[in-house]
Image: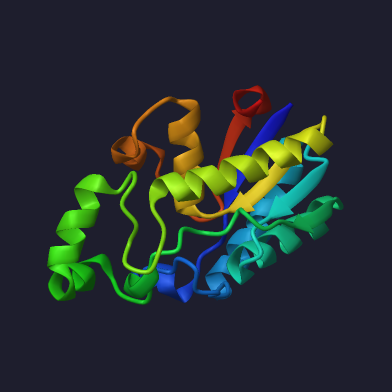
Amino acid sequence: MNIYFIRHGETDWNVENKIQGSNDIDLNGNGISQALALGEKVKTLGLPIQKIYTSPQKRARKTAKILSEAIQVDCVVTAGLEEMNLGRWEGLTWKEVKEKDIETFNIWYPNRNTEKTPDGESYEEVLSRSLATVQSILKEESQDIAIVSHGAVIKCLLCYINQLPFDQMKQFQTGNTSITIVDADHFR
């Protein structure tokens, strides 16, 4: 059984390099086009996805809905797949964070595995909730599924299965509507 991890389509905040986190930002026009193209790609490749699970956030939900309509499978909104909560830094660019909150950033960054962002989460917390959600989903499924989620969630899960620290997650960078195929046994 495979899990097809899919990052949501583009938003205006992606274009502006703003930190989205828990903000419920919707897809922009290009993001909708990306989601439509994703549906065509999945059909063309014949990926045997039997069900789609998605983060409740608008950008993921809409991507998943467009994909589910394209491939005619059910789509289930699932708590626990949301993007990392980056607290008071949301809405800023990383450059602005470093300009306005450098002291806090310098404490958080080298300790980001366990250190929470101001009013937000740590990467360990993101992994804990998303891993529990994936494992719960797998108790119900025996055929290939897609999980539409967010960059930090996917990177945390890939660090987990590859037994790598979070400071190496950059190698798992995902583009909008990218597909990452993982054997479900890595999560059992």
Q: Residue at x 50, y 56 (%)?
A: 176
Vertical relation: 128 (above or below) 115: above
Nearer to me, 179 or 157? 157
Nearer to me, 76 or 17? 76
Left or right, 95 with reference to 88:
left
From the top left corner, tell me how far across and down residue 36 is, in percent.
68, 61
From the top left corner, tell me how far across and down residue 51 is, in percent.
81, 45
Vertical relation: 184 (above or below) 140: above
From the top left corner, tell me how far across and down residue 96 is, in percent.
21, 73
Vertical relation: 25 (above or below) 154: below
Left or right, 150 with reference to 123:
right
Residue 82 seen from this side: yes
Q: Residue at x 40, y 64 (%)?
A: 120
- How many discs mark residues in the rendered view? 0
Query: In the picture, which quadrant includes the C terminus?
Result: top right
From the top left corner, tell me how far across and down residue 114 is, in percent.
34, 46
